[in-house]
Image: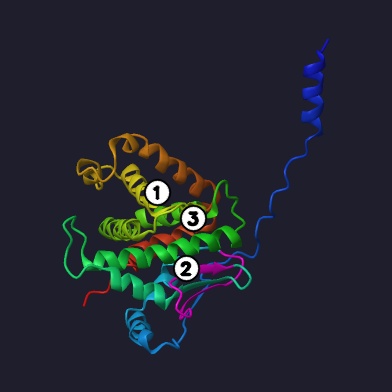
Amino acid sequence: MLGKATAMALILICSMRPAAGAAAPDNLKTNRIEISYVKPTNPAHQQIYELLQQRRVLERFQGYLSPLRLPRTLFVKTAGCDGDSNAWYENTDHTVTVCYEYIDEVLHNAPETITEKGVTRQDAIVGPTIEVFLHEIGHAIFDLLKVPILGREEDAADQTADYMILHLDQDLARQTVNGVAFMYAHEMKSQSQGFEHFADVHGVPAQRFYNLLCMAYGQDPKLFADLVEKKYLPQSRAEGCADEYKQVDYAVNKLIHRYVDQAQAKKVQAKKLLRPVQN
């Protein structure tokens, strides 16, 4: 005969309804990225506007993202943002916007010469530029494909962007990690004191810095061996980085991989579209 506690537990279990999951998106198609360079209203951004067009930055992201099978068009644009250095995904019109102010800040912060830690000016420009687009694309993927998120969405977008970065060709992955780490290190130095920044939806720069390095080392401990050897990444964190990477890899394969046309992705990967244009 069942005890009262056991009987009550069974009643509770049997009365639970399965959580209603979001309906899987339909009408999925590749090549659903539309791009636009919005003419800046601030004359100071005219050069950035022209440079982005000359380098075909959006066209190359459009090609890189073309294997994504989406239920509707995703718009990706650069635009002036009234002095706000920012980037975001807007779910009401399915648009990723990267501000000219943000690109201007990246250019301003990039070192003129190679740093003591080996970061070049090109690293410091290419890395954050790639990362900001992929981070916002991460938000778009979550929304358009109804990908469930456990935890903070900004952390998940960071992990998605880092994962995509680490699956670029090896040289570009290394360059991008260098540049993004430089950006986070710069933000660490310039961040104001106080507790308010802990209330932000994003992780603090130091957390994002170490999370990126751990993902990189966990994915390829040979390519990124110097992160531990030079003590940029503490050994105590490095020991668990392979598992941290595997966790993200499992989630991507479980939740997102099926929405990528693998045959088209192989062709796109071979083109190395996100490699910086050589002057």
Q: Residue furthest front?
A: 194
Residue linked to disc 3: 196
Query: What is the secondary structure assignment of the residue under circle 2?
Result: loop
Q: Amino acid at mark 2?
A: Ser
Q: Amino acid at mark 3?
A: Glu
Residue linked to disc 1: 207
Between discs 3 and 2, the one toward the N terminus: 2
Q: Tell which tag, 3 or 1, sits nearer the viewer.
A: 3
Query: What is the secondary structure assignment of the residue under circle 1?
Result: helix
* Whether label 3 touches label 2, CB < 8 Å: no
At a point 64% along the width and 65% down the height, the residue shown is 27
The magenta span reads: 70-90
Mark 1: few/some/many CA within 10 Å (<14, 14-19, 20+)? few
Query: What is the secondary structure assignment of the residue under circle 3?
Result: helix
Mark 2: few/some/many CA within 10 Å (<14, 14-19, 20+)? many
Between discs 1 and 2, the one toward the N terminus: 2
Residue 274: mark in rendering:
none
Residue linked to disc 2: 66
Q: Tell which tag, 1 or 2, sits nearer the viewer.
A: 1
Q: Amino acid at mark 1?
A: Gln
Please state if 243 lies on the left or on the right of 95 as rendered.
left
Q: Tell which tag, 3 or 2, sits nearer the viewer.
A: 3
The relative height of residue 225 versus residue 115 in the rendered view (above or below) is above
Mark yes or no: residue 275 visible: no
Please state the horizontal and vertical placement of residue 6, each as a whole percent of the image.
77, 18
At a point 49% along the width and 64% down the height, the residue shown is 137
